[in-house]
Amino acid sequence: MTSADRPSPPQPAPDPVPGVLTVLTTVDSAEAAAALARGAVEARLAACAQISGPVTSVYHWKDALETSQEWQVLFKTTTAAYPALEARLTADHPYDTPEILATPVVRGGADYLAWLASEVTAG
């Protein structure tokens, strides 16, 4: 077997892009989703926010199995702005215990990531 015939060793997973997050929340109406999205982007806590829905959520709440329609809002932000974004979402959210999940971005287009960083000024 020649070196050209040998499989390449597995590559390590890429490191997350420094300082870039997506943040997900869900709400009970399109209007609430739009208000959270607009408020975060206007305050420059996120470069953009995308609203998807309705989605069907199944979960336990107060000892009961619930099924409801919700709208997801996905924010693109920076790690520096995350604490302020989380505080705003918590304050403005219609739920007592809002879903707020942050996920690091592993890879992205350089131009998009530069734009994102330039649009988020809070933090």
Image: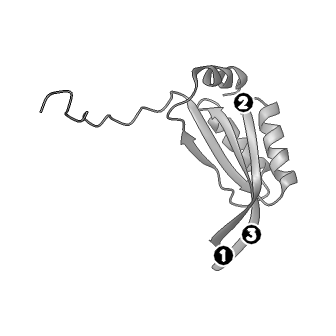
Cα–Cα gap, marks 1 and 3: 14 Å
| Mark 3 surroundings: few (<14), some (14-19) or many (≥20) residues within 10 A | few
Cα–Cα gap, marks 3 and 2: 29 Å
Task: Residue 19: give its label.
Answer: none
Q: Residue at horizontal 51%, vertical 29%?
A: 17
Which residue, given by chain and number where applicable, does mark 2 sit on?
47
Query: Which residue is nearer to you in this view: 71 or 61?
Result: 71
Q: Residue at horizontal 38%, vertical 37%?
A: 13
Circle 2 SS class: loop
Query: Which residue is nearer to you in this view: 28 or 91?
Result: 28
Vertical comparison of 80 with 52: above or below: above
Cα–Cα gap, marks 1 and 2: 35 Å
Considering only order in the chain, which callout, 3 or 1, is on the residue closer to the N terminus?
A: 1
Location of residue 34 in the rendering, given as x and y in whole percent from the top left corner: 84, 46
Vertical comparison of 63 with 96: above or below: below
**The N terminus - image quarter:** top left
Amino acid type, label 3: Ser
Considering only order in the chain, which callout, 2 or 3, is on the residue closer to the N terminus?
A: 2
| Mark 2 surroundings: few (<14), some (14-19) or many (≥20) residues within 10 A | many
Which residue, given by chain and number where applicable, does mark 3 sit on?
68
Which residue, given by chain and number where applicable, does mark 1 sit on?
62
Circle 1 SS class: loop
